[in-house]
Amino acid sequence: SSRQSEGSQLPRYVRVNTLKTTVEDAIDYLKREGFMYHGQAGRMEDLKTLCGKTFIRDLHLPELLVFPPKIDFHDHFLYQAGHIILQDKASCLPAYLLNPPVGAQVLDACAAPGNKTSHLAAIMRNKGKLLAFDLDAKRLATMSTLLLRAGVTCQQLANQDFLKVDPESAEYSGVEYVLLDPSCSGSGMVCLQDGSSEPLDAGRLQALAGFQLRCLNHALRFPKLRRLVYSTCSIHTQENEEVLSACLKENRRFRLVPLLPSWPERGLAPLPQCLRASPASTLTHGFFVAVLERRAEGEEEEE
Ligand code: SAM
């Protein structure tokens, strides 16, 4: 299908795992293997023209290397050893934008298989507390393997329904950062969508949006929460802007943070603070990301 061919045309993104190596060492290793390094990209067009054994550094995300479409690193030493993580550029945005400080207490509410958790651990330099929940035991098992390979040690995994976690519990009294990447329709995943996949009916979309809003409202109840990132790999407004708008109406103590001014695709009106991603504009899968921050005491709430 056209969406499959769209997916196979996307550049391949490699996130350097800074728990195991540095961007410079990964670049040197690849150069010694015969890859040509073209330096840092200056504009989106530089990501489109890659071919053969060449790569560049991404223009938005500092730990991201960009390769031509179809290159496969699954059997590569750097992947096997956990020095690189094979992760789409859009899915690197949530941890990067949450940007928890070293030593922070962070909660990843719907965490498996854990690429974003491993990215959070790298940003926290494995220091602090990284609580990661998932409802699905099998996915959590995969996640343990992934985190082990990535050298993550600051995590506490739990097979938990996030909606049943009590935000008022003493265990979570220090949680200041939440990453919320709940189940979604997956409508942004270009390679996974093909003619044979079930059409998304209105009822399913509504159920997902209801779940996502419950998760978001629940996450905002952690008493010390300062900053939260919400993301989906959906292109549907119902799972993205509409969930955020409904949540902001109910939670006047939080505001949307304007994100990356240079990012080419924005949240649909009235939420231009948020980011969208798509094959056409950002050379990634379809994605949505929003950051909420607690207002300062006494701060005016704009309408
Ligand atoms: N953040 C993950 C990553 O980057 O690898 C991907 C998360 S995936 C989009 C959504 C996850 O939410 C699934 O693994 C699913 O099992 C989990 N999930 C669904 N409902 C949940 C709930 N009520 N509590 C916790 N996890 C849930």
Image: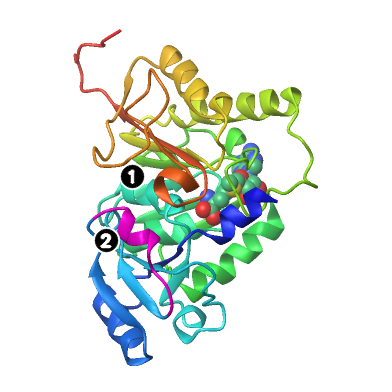
Q: Is mark 2 within 8 Å of ligand 1?
A: no
| Residue 5, percent from left and from top | 62, 56
Check disc 1 and give the amino acid type: Leu
- In the rendered image, residue 128 lying in the magenta stretch gets the answer no
| SS class, disc 1 | helix
Residue ranking furthest to the top: 303
Instruction: State whether residue 19 is above or below residue 204.
Output: below
Q: Is residue 76 left or right of residue 134?
A: left
Q: Nearer the viewer, residue 274 or 196?
A: 196
| Residue 176, percent from left and from top | 33, 40
Q: Is mark 1 within 8 Å of ligand 1?
A: no
Instruction: State whether residue 188 is above or below residue 268.
Output: below
Give the Cα distance between marks 1 and 2: 15 Å
Q: Is residue 93 visible?
A: yes
Residue shown at 25% from the left, 23% from the top: 295
Q: Quadrant of residue 228?
A: top left
| Residue 99, percent from left and from top | 29, 49
* Mark carried by residue 188: none
Report the magenta stretch's main SS.
loop
Tell me if label 1 and label 2 are in contact, CB under 8 Å: no
User: Which of pointers 1 and 2 lies earlier in the amino acid sequence?
Assistant: 2
* Mark carried by residue 62: 2
Check disc 2 and give the amino acid type: Pro
| Residue 276, percent from left and from top | 43, 37
Residue at label 1?
98
Q: Which residues are magenta?
A: 43-52
Q: Is residue 19 visible?
A: no
Badge 1: residue crowd in 10 Å (few <14, some 14–19, many ≥20)? many
Q: Is residue 16 left or right of residue 12?
A: left
Residue shown at 24% from the left, 42% from the top: 262
Instruction: State whether residue 218 is above or below residue 40.
Output: above
